Structure formats: C-alpha cells, structure tokens
C-alpha cells in the first residue's frame, strides 16, 4: 500500500489562473520551499474562467482543465518540481450534469487529467463530490483499477458524508488515504458532524479546503457573526504576535487528528506566511474561545 507524508499544509490550485503578479513557477516554488509538498488541483478548476479558456493549451473551450493545464505546462518546463511534490487531482464534477462517478466517465476524466498534467500518473486521485447515482461496488472497482494500472498511486474522496465514505471503503481493495471536506473557523461542522470521526475511524488524513473561508475570515465582514469571529481572531493574533490568517490556520492545525489545510492564496509572501502557522501552538482555552466565537453561544 502506498503511504505518503502529506506534510502539515498543502497548496491549492483552484485559483491557479493567469495572469497573476507571480508566475505559476514562482507560486509553486514558494509553496514547495515553504514545505507545502501536497499540490491539490482538480479537472474542473478553470471552468468558466475565460482567461484560461483562451490562453491555456489543453483546457477545454469552457476553461475546464485550465488549472491542470497550467500546472502541466509548468511541470513540463521544470520537470524537477514533479519530484518534490505529491500531485493530487480530482474528477467527478461534470458540468452541467453536475456529477458523474460512472466507470466510463471517470476513466475518460483520469486520462484527460494525465494528458493536461503531462504526466503518466498522479499521486492522489480524489472523487470531487459524491454522485448520488453512484454504484459503490462499480466505483470501487474503477478506482482499484486506476491504482492497479499505475496511473494513480493513492485514493481519496472529497465532500462525502461519513456514510458515503464507509460505503465506498467497504468495497475498495485499496484503502482510502484522504478525505477533503471544507473546514475552517467559519465552516466548523466537521468538528461535530462525524466527518473527523470517520477520518479517525478509517485513518484518513483530512485535507481542509478553503481554510480561510475563501478569504472571508480576513475580508470586510458581511455579518455580525463574521465580525465576532474576526474580533476573536484579531485578539488571539495580538496575544500570539502573529496575523489573524495564521491563527485561523493554527486553529485547524491544533486538532490532534492532523488536519492539513489546503491554502488558496496565490501570493508568494502569503504562502510563506501561511506556512509559518505550523510554529504556533494554540492553547486549549484559546481554541475553544475561537470555536465558541463562531458557534455564537457557549458549549453545552
Ligand atoms: N474539494 C472541494 O470541493 C474544494 C472546494 C474549494 C477549494 N478546494 C481546495 O482548497 C484550496 C483552497 O481554497 P481557497 O482558495 O478558497 O482557500 P482559502 O485559503 O480559504 O482562501 C484563499 C483566498 O483568500 C485570500 N486571502 C488569503 N490570505 C488573505 C489575507 N491575509 N487577507 C485577505 N485575503 C486573503 C486569497 O487571496 P490572495 O490570493 O490575494 O492572497 C484567496 O483569494 C483550493 O485551491 C482547492 O485546492 C477544494
């Protein structure tokens, strides 16, 4: 069985578009130099982005595949970067359907991802969202086949309910390694809805998407609840002598299960700043203070 050291934080490619003040290579180097070796993309990233649709060779006309194509171009020009990373992608969102986890679709989707990424294999292949028409036995056999073919080294899921993970895991020969739900100081449901518990039960590494709430934790608040959360982040940041963004990441890193935040910033300085969150040790008291600020009322 393939196992990976995913590191403590990962770099996300949802916002990997061009033009940007930093080149794709600069952004990747910033992430890898900061110790973020898990590079997370998806075939859908770039969809609806007219820049990608026009400029990225390999992307489809609607931008689908745009982020993978940008990453693939960069890896083709700088092949040594591939050896430094754990390359993860996802498939199964098929606009406008919206989801398709059938054998025929996923097989074609994986081939297209490999072509755009200009590689023979990905380290981690994740089902992006649960397809409500999934035949779990067939999906498991399809995914096991991907691993047996050598085109995929390890498997994960994203946005699955615990029961859906269990149903898939029951049929897989290759153990799932990761689950990727949204987790942040704004999206706190996984702490109490069984998501982290199923990760513990099946020894899955939780990869947290949008760990800064898509930036909303740092941007002008749109609600009194968000304002309360931001005040708590600010007060904690002053106490620890770091930034609110770093506290928001430290909040996830503090969980003993080992949540790996997938940071989304495309700014090399912010990538480096985010990575330094691993040096912060939040006290249990401060962790709960932040949690309760988001919850809006004391714990029972
Ligand atoms: N599985 C899924 O369904 C799913 C869904 C969504 C995302 N994801 C994954 O999660 C990754 C991260 O998602 P995300 O981009 O939403 O993550 P995020 O880290 O929550 O948000 C990133 C956004 O916040 C902004 N930001 C960061 N630091 C800031 C600061 N100090 N002040 C103000 N704004 C700041 C960034 O802007 P700058 O670039 O300007 O810094 C960027 O626009 C994605 O790349 C993808 O890999 C997965």
Image (cartoon, rainbow, N blue to C red):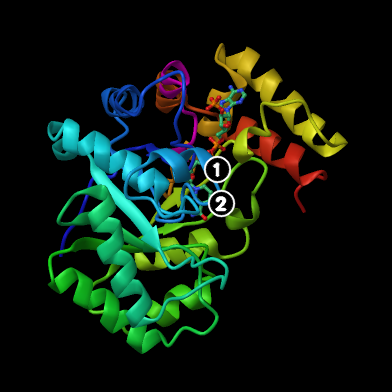
Badge 2 or badge 1: first in the primary sequence: 2
Q: In the picture, residue 247 is in which quadrant?
A: top right
The correct choice, above or below, for 61 with respect to 27 in the image is below
For this view, does 152 lie left or right of residue 243? left
Residue shown at the point (62%, 18%) measured from the top left: 237
Residues rendered magenta in the picture? 261-271
Residue shown at the point (13%, 35%) measured from the top left: 79
Look at mark 1 in the image and give the residue it sits on. 210
The residue positioned farthest toward the right in the image shown: 224
Residue shown at the point (40%, 85%) measured from the top left: 136
Q: Is mark 2 within 8 Å of ligand 1?
A: yes
x, y percentage for residue 206?
43, 53
Residue 170 appears in the figure: no
Q: Nearer the viewer, residue 222 or 81?
A: 81
10 Å crowding of disc 2: few (<14), some (14-19), many (20+): many
Q: Is residue 181 magenta?
A: no
Q: In the picture, residue 248 is in which quadrant?
A: top right
- Report if the CB atoms under discs 2 and 1 are less than 8 Å apart: yes
User: Element under label 2?
Assistant: loop
| The label number, if any, that marks residue 16 in the structure image | none
Look at mark 2 in the image and give the residue it sits on. 182
Residue 223 appears in the figure: yes
């Amino acid at each position: 069985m393939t196992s990976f050291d995913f590191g403590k934080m990962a770099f996300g490619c949802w916002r990997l578009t061009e033009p940007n003040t930093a080149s794709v290579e600069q952004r990747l180097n910033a992430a890898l130099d900061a110790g973020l070796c898990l590079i997370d993309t998806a075939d859908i990233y770039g969809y609806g982005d007219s820049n990608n649709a026009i400029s990225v060779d390999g992307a489809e006309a609607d931008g689908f595949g745009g982020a993978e194509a940008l990453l693939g171009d960069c890896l083709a020009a700088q092949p040594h970067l591939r050896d430094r990373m754990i390359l993860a992608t996802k498939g199964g969102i098929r606009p406008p359907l919206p989801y398709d986890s059938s054998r025929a679709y996923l097989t074609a989707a994986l081939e297209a991802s490999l072509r755009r990424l200009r590689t023979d294999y990905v380290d981690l292949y994740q089902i992006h969202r649960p397809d409500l028409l999934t035949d779990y036995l067939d999906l498991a056999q399809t995914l096991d086949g991907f691993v047996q073919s050598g085109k995929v080294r390890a498997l994960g899921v994203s946005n699955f309910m615990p029961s859906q993970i269990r149903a898939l895991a029951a049929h897989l020969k290759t153990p799932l390694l990761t689950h990727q739900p949204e987790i942040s100081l704004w999206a706190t449901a996984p702490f109490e809805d069984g998501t982290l518990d199923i990760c513990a039960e099946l020894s899955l590494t939780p990869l947290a998407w949008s760990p800064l709430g898509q930036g909303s934790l740092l941007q002008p608040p749109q609600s009194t609840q968000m304002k309360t959360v931001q005040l708590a982040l600010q007060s904690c940041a002053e106490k620890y002598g770091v930034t609110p963004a770093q506290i928001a990441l430290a909040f996830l890193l503090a969980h003993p299960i080992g949540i790996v935040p997938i940071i989304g910033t495309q700014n090399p300085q912010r990538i480096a700043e985010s990575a330094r969150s691993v040096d912060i040790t939040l006290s249990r008291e401060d962790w709960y203070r932040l949690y309760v600020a988001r919850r809006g009322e004391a714990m029972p």
